[in-house]
C-alpha cells in the first residue's frame, strides 16, 4: 500500500471541499482526465471550472487501493440542496503524487468493477 498516493487523494478531497482551488490544481497533473454523469473532460482549466461551479462536497468513506489506483466511496452533498446526501464512488489514478485521472461512479460496485479492485483491496473503512 502506498500511503503517499492515499495522502494525495485525501488532500485532493480536502482542497475540493474547502474551495482551495490552487491546492487542488497543484495536486493534479496538467492533463488530468475527469469524468462523471455529465461526460468527460481534461486539463487543469476544466478542473478549475468544475471545482468552482459544481458546488459539491465529497467526504471520503471506504477506500480501496492497488498499484496507483484508488476507489473512494464518498458521501456527496451539493450546495443547491445541502440536506440531501448520496453515497457514490470515484476512481482515482495517482502518479508521482499527482492525480492524473478521476472518474465518478454512481455506486461503489461500479467503481470497483471499472478498476478491477475488490474487497481484498480495502485499506480504510471509516
Image (cartoon, grey):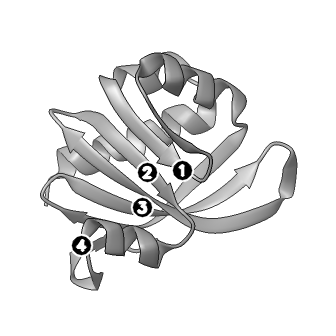
**Which residue is disc 3 drawn over?**
72
Cβ–Cβ below 8 Å for labels 2 and 1? yes
Mark 3 neighbour class, 10 Å CA radius: few under 14, some 14 to 19, many 20 or more: many
Q: How far, Cα to Cα, is label 4 from label 1?
A: 18 Å
Any part of residue 124 in sight: no
In which image quadrant can residue 88 be found?
bottom right
Mark 4 neighbour class, 10 Å CA radius: few under 14, some 14 to 19, many 20 or more: few
The quarter of the rendered structure image containing the N terminus is bottom left
- For residue 36, the mark is 1
- What is the x, y in percent for residue 52? 66, 24
- What is the x, y in percent for residue 113? 34, 75
Q: How far, Cα to Cα, is label 3 from label 2?
A: 10 Å
Position of residue 63 relative to residue 100, above or below, is below
**Which residue is disc 2 drawn over?**
103
Q: How far, Cα to Cα, is label 4 from label 2?
A: 14 Å
Q: How far, Cα to Cα, is label 3 from label 4?
A: 14 Å
Instruction: Indicate left or right for 32 with 47 as reference.
Output: left
Cβ–Cβ below 8 Å for labels 3 and 2? no
Q: Earlier in the sequence, mark 4 or mark 1?
A: 1
Position of residue 125 relative to residue 103, above or below, is below
Amino acid at each position: 500500500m502506498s500511503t503517499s498516493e492515499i495522502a494525495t487523494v485525501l488532500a485532493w478531497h480536502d482542497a475540493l471541499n474547502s474551495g482551495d482551488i490552487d491546492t487542488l490544481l497543484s495536486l493534479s497533473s496538467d492533463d488530468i482526465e475527469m469524468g462523471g454523469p455529465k461526460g468527460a473532460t481534461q486539463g487543469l482549466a476544466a478542473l478549475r471550472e468544475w471545482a468552482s461551479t459544481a458546488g459539491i462536497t465529497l467526504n471520503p468513506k471506504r477506500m480501496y487501493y492497488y498499484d496507483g489506483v484508488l476507489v473512494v466511496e464518498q458521501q456527496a452533498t451539493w450546495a443547491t440542496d445541502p440536506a440531501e446526501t448520496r453515497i457514490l464512488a470515484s476512481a482515482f489514478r495517482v502518479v508521482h503524487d499527482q492525480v492524473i485521472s478521476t472518474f465518478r461512479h454512481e455506486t461503489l460496485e461500479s467503481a470497483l468493477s471499472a478498476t478491477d479492485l475488490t474487497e481484498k483491496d480495502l485499506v480504510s473503512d471509516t
